[in-house]
Image (cartoon, coloured by chain):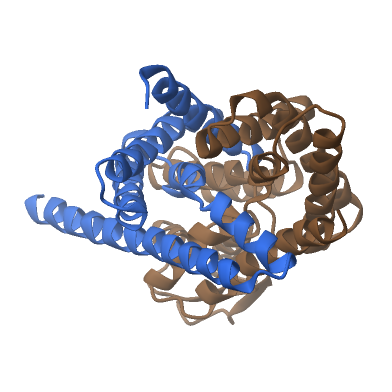
């Protein structure tokens, strides 16, 4: 293989990996297209053709090497990785790292995930639930029980997501658990209002990333990926709603 | 609304926005500024509602403020914009109305439920339209900047 061809392969590999990491972790499509075009341009490709969708990416450069496909199989929310890819792309544009280093770092980034420690995530779930219950409902006495119920609900979601790969089912189960715990808490005299506790506790489960990305994708003219994300958000919301409704029916 | 209540709301919004950022793993140096953008959007919403502007207009203005402020933060910190606006819309999410809707549907009170459904749709639409307007502001700003250079 000639060195030019090898170089083209490396450009394609780098751009496609960067794009896949960004979509997998919850980036909007326009940013992915922008980053991949920049990488190809900075690497010296004269032209680049891109087709980015929420389930896969198609890219060709220079019209010489055949186009390559990169499927996107899973989707999680890890916005730090998007920020890191963005940083690397900027460093590459400033000639601080070369293409091979860029590619290696992307492969490394792909294999490790650096989340916040588990106890901090639990605390964060509690700190989303309690304060928002107070902000929305002005019910200060129920602050603590909402924190606890929200934390346990998120724990259920987290553990189930580890074992079953279908996010909607984890959300449904977590919402049902929140409903049961809220009713139980009021029954035991730990809280006053089932409604307020549930409203606060489901907030950590709100699909904020798909909602925002859906709006931004549709505005950018991505009429396939935008509505797809919207459906994702809608199904999440419906799963949470069904979980709560089921508990309310039986109590 | 007393001063204490107001301070509690601001603190609650800040903490909740920051904590939601931790749940979706936002880099540490973006967390603080994201929290303040959340407070800004919520305050605009709250004052509009207190001033009699209605909750739809309030959410619209809040979303516009969040969108514009997020872009400034993204430029300033050289980070993607979604790191700032995703946690910041969480305090605007119509959680209370959505819950009432689900509850009333579950209990078979469809008329009340449809009322709440309408509110949820209006608020979500207002937030989406607010983002659209902020995008307009951002694009005009980008055009002006490019023109000047």
Chain A colour as displayed: brown
Residue with the most extreme left position: B148
Residue at 60 percent across and 36 percent down: it is: A133
Near-viewer residue (A1 or B27): B27
Q: Is residue A161 above or below residue B30?
A: below
Quadrant assignment, res A185? top right
Percent across and percent down for residue A37 are 43, 64
Q: Is residue A166 above or below residue A59?
A: above
Percent across and percent down for residue B136 are 24, 61
Near-viewer residue (B146 or B127): B127
Horizontal side, residue A104 vs residue A246: left or right: left
* Chain letter, blue: B
Horizontal side, residue A174 vs residue B97: left or right: right
Quadrant assignment, res A249? bottom right
Q: Is residue A183 above or below residue B22?
A: below
Residue at 74 percent across and 28 percent down: it is: A145
Horizontal side, residue A68 vs residue B18: left or right: right
């Amino acid at each position: 293989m000639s060195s030019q061809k090898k170089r083209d392969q490396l450009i394609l590999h780098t751009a496609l990996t960067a794009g896949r990491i960004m979509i997998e972790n919850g980036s909007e499509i326009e940013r992915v297209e922008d980053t991949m075009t920049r990488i190809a341009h900075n690497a010296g490709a004269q032209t680049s053709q891109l087709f980015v969708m929420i389930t896969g990416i198609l890219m060709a450069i220079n019209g010489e090497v055949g186009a390559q496909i990169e499927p996107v199989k899973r989707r999680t929310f890890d916005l730090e990785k998007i920020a890191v890819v963005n940083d690397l792309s900027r460093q590459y544009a400033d000639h601080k790292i070369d293409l091979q280093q860029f590619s290696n770092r992307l492969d490394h980034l792909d294999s490790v995930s650096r989340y916040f420690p588990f106890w901090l995530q639990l605390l964060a779930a509690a700190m989303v639930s309690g304060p928002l219950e107070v902000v929305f409902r002005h019910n200060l006495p129920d602050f603590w029980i909402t924190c606890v119920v929200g934390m346990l609900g998120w724990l259920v979601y987290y553990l189930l997501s580890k074992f079953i790969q279908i996010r909607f089912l984890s959300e449904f189960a977590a919402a049902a658990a929140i409903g049961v715990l809220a009713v139980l808490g009021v029954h035991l005299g730990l809280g006053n209002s089932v409604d307020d506790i549930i409203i606060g506790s489901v907030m950590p489960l709100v699909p904020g990333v798909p909602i925002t990305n859906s709006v931004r994708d549709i505005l950018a003219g991505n009429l396939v990926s935008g509505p797809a994300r919207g459906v994702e958000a809608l199904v999440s919301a419906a799963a949470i709603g069904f979980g709560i409704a089921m508990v309310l029916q039986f109590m | 609304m007393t001063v204490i209540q107001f301070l509690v709301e601001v603190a609650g919004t800040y903490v909740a926005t920051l904590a939601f950022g931790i749940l979706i793993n936002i880099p540490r140096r973006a967390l603080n500024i994201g929290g303040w953008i959340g407070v800004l959007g919520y305050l605009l919403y709250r004052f509009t509602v207190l001033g009699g502007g209605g909750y739809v207009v309030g959410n619209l203005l809040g979303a516009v403020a969040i969108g514009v402020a997020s872009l400034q933060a993204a430029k300033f910190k050289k980070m993607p914009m979604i790191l700032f606006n995703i946690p910041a819309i969480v305090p605007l999410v119509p959680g209370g109305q959505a819950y009432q809707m689900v509850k009333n549907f579950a209990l078979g009170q469809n008329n009340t439920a449809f009322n709440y459904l309408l509110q949820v749709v209006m608020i979500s639409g207002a937030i989406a339209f607010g983002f659209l307007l902020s995008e307009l502001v951002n694009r005009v700003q980008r055009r002006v900047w490019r023109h000047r250079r």
